[in-house]
Amino acid sequence: MSTINYSEKIPNNVNLGEDRTLQRALEGWQPNFINWWDDVGPDGSTNYDVYLRTAVSVDPQGWAQFGHVKMRDYRWGIFLNPGDANREIHFGDHKGEKAWQDVPGEHRANLRRIIVTQGDTEPASVEQQRHLGLTAPSMYDLRNLFQINVEEGRHLWAMVYLLHKHFGRDGREEAEALLQRTSGDENNPRILGAFNERTPDWLAFFMFTYFTDRDGKFQLSALAESAFDPLARTTKFMLTEEAHHMFVGESGVSRVLARTAQVMNELKTDDAQKVRAAGAIDLGTIQRYLNFHYSVTIDLFGADQSSNAAIFYSSGLKGRYEEGKRTDDHVLKGQTYKVLEVKDGQLVEKDVPMLNALNEVLRDDFIKDSVAGVGRWNKVLEKAGIPTRLVVPHKAFNRQIGALAGIKMSPEGRVVNEVEWAAKKNEWLPSTEDFAFVASLMGRVVEPGKFAGWISPPVMGINRQPVDFEYVRFG
Amino acid sequence: MDMAVEAGVIKQHLIDPEICIRCNTCEATCPVNAITHDDNNYVVRADICNGCMACISPCPTGSIDNWRTMPVVRAYSIEEQFTWESLPAELSPEELEAAGVAAGSGDETEAAAAPVPTQAQATAEAAEPVFNSAQYGATVPPWSAAHAYTNLFPPKSPTTATVVGNFNCTEAGFDSETHHIVLDFGVVPFPVLEGQSIGIVPPGVDAIGKRHHARQYSVASPRNGERPGYNNVSLTVKRVTEDHQGDPVRGVCSNYVCDLKVGDTVQVVGPFGASFLMPNHPKSHIVMICTGTGSAPMRAMTEWRRRLRKSGKFEGGKLMLFFGARTQQELPYFGPLQSLPKDFIDINLAFSRTPGQPKRYVQDLMRERAADLAALLKDGASHFYVCGLKSMEEGVVLALRDVAKEAGLDWDTVGAALKREGRLHLETY
Ligand SMILES: Cc1cc2nc3c(=O)[nH]c(=O)nc-3n(C[C@H](O)[C@H](O)[C@H](O)COP(=O)(O)OP(=O)(O)OC[C@H]3O[C@@H](n4cnc5c(N)ncnc54)[C@H](O)[C@@H]3O)c2cc1C
Ligand code: SF4
Ligand code: SF4
């Protein structure tokens, strides 16, 4: 087995060089990780030098170092935000006690489950995106895709570090299993549904990075409040990187909209077929993609009532989004929250104990954040003088998890029967034909400064480089 | 110091709400908590942001890198920024002029605020509550300062100067040598005062093909010239041979300047700076605290006082100097400094890397001289100047604060008076 100088090869601030046990564990895992990357990482990109942002330390300059790097040689590292020795648990039943540096025995199983679930999503998105490099609409976009991929890879490291460091043999086995499951694999799929969906094209990719990586932001934020200090510090650092993923999604869809609006204005038409014929993606298709990714993503927050959520919160494992900024008692006993259910063919609200509704609380925070961003997309249309607006579908639309699972619902939130659903499904969700059309636009454009016809160039380049900078050098 | 705050003008740091994705990275990064948000926007507090640039490269969108030249009194409040849907336009030259800002100072501050990008200490500070030394720096000159001209040659129209002198003013044989450069402006008017700086535009273009931006250098000569009666200025320029992390790198402009030959011409912009100026009234005391090339303005002030004294025109105020360098060999002007009379200037040298001796920094010396400094802090005629490496600023201001406290003074009152009366000036880079 190769001996690796971890402090050099793997930048870390966890004193890897001095922790023999951890070092051995990672030495066993590292080659398998590289194999995984080679097998299911970005297709056909082995020789590319990509202009990547690499973290070499957690300070602002250290974690945002830019330069051309072969992805395989990316400095996969382990970074935790600086700790605060006096940090206190600030919610749940242990409120006011000192944060834990080790896993308390009674919470071991739950913590491991949380970490494994989070860790499982990271390699999954790399797998889901592996073929997208072959249809990138520009060199700039190709670079952004790869940036996301390497960071997802590193976030996997972050979770594997926690498993190895704090969960002994179980942890090592779980870490191994993270590399064995594969997105969409019938026999050994990823844990969460959305991470087994295909990401067939770049519009789907942008929607995924906008909505699904935003789920990541909220989950990581909730974990960043954890009483288990190493988890809180790890996820805090991951959050700083996650931002780039959402950026790719938000700006990606904006640029698609800008291009569509431009074509609509040039042709003076809002006819979807004419827009398509001109090589742009019509707004209806964009809305249907949005409906799909939004509804699949809000399922990721879990059932609207969950005793696990209550346990995770009360025992201090997982807080709420921006827990520290909230002004309630941070214990939440005896409080209630409104969730939706269907009664007599009607959607109604009912009060349930707040602690059991924490998934719904997090989902609602996510919804608020997503809707604000959709508002920014609409500004693009507004500026171009296009009257159409995108909207997020009703929270109950197309849900597969929780009390709303399987209920047929229009995007506006009207309960519909099977017949209407079947008739309208293709108006509400992307149809086979929509996918085929979008797929037909996906051709590879990788000359510096050139862009596929269905997307506008970005407002500015990465790290203040020009838009036509050579972001990827093909080996 | 925050160079942006000159003559009541700031380069206000703003976030473009049309591009920002509200990801919170900047807020999590900013070492001084200058960034905050509401449901609508992420915004920067103008009174807290010190332009350290720590937030720039972590921002995934580039929306954070927006700067507007604003009269301090009209700086956008965060409440105003919360309502924005897009960035307001730059104020027009007329609007700026109307607000008392000289035309072209936008460019001036651009050169001045050009990222001094690394600040490793930012992170160390991030964990603890941060003492914001920059907030004590004055934005007005002392009342008795002479009138300064600024921006006679803005970056868009530089002037040309001829090199008439260039020699190493540190001990020979050190890579990190510091040069003393003399530039002559011929018949072109280029009036400067001690404490001002000028910009040098290095020839050529940067990595992305843009013309190099001007680098600023403090004037090291007094107002009547390095050679009295000639239209010339001197500079103290240290070769940059490594970056702030200690990795080898050849600084673009400093090496260009250090390699100039007598007779070469250079492109110059400026002058800049209207607050880091020396007091002129005879009772004024000057406390100078500097490291390395931060000695340039101190040399200028000292030399002006020396000339005045020689001509019998100046009777009074004290001069006190705290000067730090790694070693004696690296201390610019070490020889000439030694020959100044003791009753003229009180010199305190701190060396941080003298083999076999404990490290000493300027703030250590200041604490040792607490009794004398306390007396000066109590005297309304005292003026404090801090210039040199950014990393010294906080330690120095903290030392001043502690000296004041130990002397039973209320630092909040003293600090506020120093700032208000233009008696504490910070210029670090
Ligand atoms: C108001 C003001 C007054 C100044 N006065 C003087 C002066 O009197 N004399 C003087 O020599 N300089 C002075 N400077 C600094 C000067 O403007 C340049 O920043 C410096 O000469 C480096 O420029 P460069 O082009 O050589 O390096 P660049 O090519 O700009 O930078 C190269 C690398 O060196 C790093 N770097 C930049 N400056 C330093 C530094 N000082 N120490 C270590 N690493 C650095 C950068 O981070 C970068 O990685 C002043 C700056 C300001 C803002
Ligand atoms: S420039 Fe520095 S002080 Fe200003 S907002 Fe950014 S990180 Fe904060
Ligand atoms: S880091 Fe950039 S994109 Fe993110 S919130 Fe701050 S300004 Fe906006």
Image: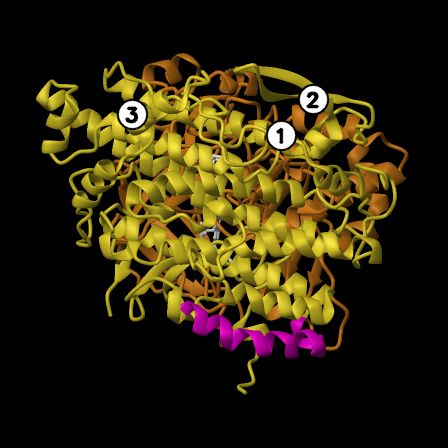
Chain colours: A yellow, B orange
Neighbours of disc 1 within 10 Å: few (<14), some (14-19), many (20+): many
Are marks 1 and 3 in one subunit?
Answer: yes
Q: Toward which corner of the image does residue A329 lie, by quadrant?
A: top right
Which residue matches tag 2?
A337
In the rendered image, residues at marks 2 and 3 fall on the same chain: yes
Question: Which of B48/B268 is in front?
Answer: B48
Q: Is the magenta stretch mostly helix, strand or loop?
A: helix
Chain of the residue under the numbered disc 1 shown in the image:
A
Residue B355 lies within the magenta run: no
**Chain name for mark 2:** A
Rendered position, A101 above or below A366: below
Q: Decide: marks 1, 3 in contact (CB < 8 A)?
A: no
Task: Tell me what residue is drawn at x 59 percent, y 29 percent.
Answer: A403
Mark 2 vs 1, N-terminal side: 2
Name the residue tied to disc 3: A427
Residue at 55 percent of width and 22 percent of height: B39
Residue on which the image places disc 1: A360
* Amino acid type of the residue tagged 1 in the rendering: Glu
- Examine the image and state in which quarter residue A219 appears: top right
Bounds of the magenta span? Answer: A16-37
Instruction: Say whether residue A448 is visible.
Output: yes
Q: Which of A83 and A221 is in front in this view?
A: A221
Q: In this view, does B146 lie to the left or right of A95?
A: left
Spatial CA span between label 2 and label 3: 33 Å
Residue B293 position, x and y percent, is: 53, 55
Percent coordinates x, y for residue A273 in the rendering: 13, 27
Mark 1 or mark 3: name the one nearer the start of the chain: 1
Pinpoint residue A357: horizontal percent, then vertical percent: 68, 29
Residue A116 image position (x, y, % from top left): 62, 57
Mark 1 element type: helix
Q: Which residue lies furthest to the front in this view?
A: A419
Q: Do labels 2 and 1 share a chain?
A: yes
